[in-house]
């Protein structure tokens, strides 16, 4: 019988595969029918995911996938830097079985990058970081990273990431190579660079310091060159100033 953990895991996987977009509604009744279980079990799963920062609930919309803000996006990447670089820094050795598991994961990534299954490719690229934590012997951080990579995937979808999948896979390969050679400082630096590249590919708009900047731009009057000339003549006649004066008349309100 489907339990709450099964449902929450499926939702996390769907998010990492970019099959559930930010803001997607998650109806309790629909999920109960889909998983053939009670709404109580569904609500338990969603409550668990809410505590992990993947979904949220409101009185009007019900349950839905979170839509991270700009500040939350930056915090998510900072958290990943602290966790993943710290994880590598605290590691002194990695066994052959762990390296074998990482290389097997990389092989799946490479195949997915060449294929046309975008969902599988997205999932594997994010799951690499979870796999790395597991292979470095920290299952607790692996669970934490699973949530953070899911949130990072939502951020990438929301802020239109242009990061190249093949480039991301190649960076994973370099990280594993450094670990295999025992170059821990190099691996840590490569991880920092990799996370930086992923973040830099996002269209995160920086604040101009003007809270009305976006609205001001949107409501700026549309005008043709002829309209501009007429407005300038009107301003000149009303103010007695030269048409060469660069101050505005009608646009001053915005």
Image (tube, grey):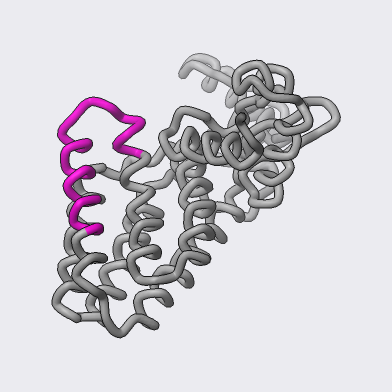
Q: Main secondary structure of the magenta part?
A: helix
Residue 48 place in picture, x, y as percent: 69, 46
78 shown above or below 106 = below
For the point 45% across and 43% down, the residue is 153
95 shown above or below 4 = below
Q: Nearer the viewer, residue 225 or 44?
A: 44
The boundaries of the magenta stretch are 101-122
Counting labels gives 0
For the point 31% across and 30% down, the residue is 118
Per the image, is 160 magenta? Answer: no
201 shown above or below 24 = below
The answer to whether one can see residue 248 in this image is no
For the point 60% across and 54% down, the residue is 72
Horizontal side of residue 222 vs 13, given as left or right:
right
For the N terminus, the image quarter is top right
Per the image, is 119 magenta? Answer: yes
**Residue sitting at the far front:** 1
Horizontal side of residue 112 vs 76, given as left or right:
left
Q: Quadrant of residue 18?
A: top left
**Residue sitting at the far right:** 59
The answer to whether one can see residue 231 in this image is yes
Residue 43 place in picture, x, y as percent: 75, 34
Residue 222 place in picture, x, y as percent: 56, 19
Horizontal side of residue 76 vs 108, given as left or right:
right
For the C terminus, the image quarter is top right
For the point 74% across and 25% down, the residue is 38
Residue 32 place in picture, x, y as percent: 68, 22
Q: Nearer the viewer, residue 208 or 206?
A: 206
Q: Quadrant of residue 59?
A: top right
């Amino acid at each position: 019988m489907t339990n709450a953990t099964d449902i929450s895991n499926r939702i996390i996987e769907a998010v990492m595969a970019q099959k559930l977009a930010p803001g997607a509604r998650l109806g309790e009744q629909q999920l109960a029918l889909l998983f053939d279980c009670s709404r109580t079990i569904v609500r338990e799963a969603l409550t668990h995911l809410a505590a992990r920062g993947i979904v949220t609930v409101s009185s009007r919309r019900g349950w839905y996938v979170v839509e991270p803000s700009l500040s939350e996006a930056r915090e998510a990447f900072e958290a990943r830097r602290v966790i993943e670089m710290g994880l590598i820094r605290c590691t002194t050795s990695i066994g052959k079985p762990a390296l074998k598991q990482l290389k097997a994961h990389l092989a799946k990534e490479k195949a997915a990058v060449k294929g046309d299954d975008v969902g599988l490719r997205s999932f594997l690229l994010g799951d690499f970081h979870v796999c790395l934590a597991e292979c470095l012997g920290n299952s607790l951080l692996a669970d934490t990273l699973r949530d953070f990579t899911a949130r990072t995937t939502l951020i990438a979808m929301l802020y239109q990431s242009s990061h190249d999948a093949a480039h991301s896979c190649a960076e994973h390969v370099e990280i594993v190579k450094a670990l295999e050679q025992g170059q821990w400082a190099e691996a840590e630096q490569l991880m920092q660079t990799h996370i930086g590249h992923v973040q830099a590919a996002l269209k995160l708009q920086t604040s101009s310091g003007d809270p009305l900047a976006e609205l001001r731009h949107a409501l700026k009057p549309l005008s043709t060159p002829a309209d501009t000339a007429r407005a300038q003549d009107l301003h000149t006649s009303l103010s007695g100033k030269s048409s060469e004066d660069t101050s505005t008349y009608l646009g001053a309100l915005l």
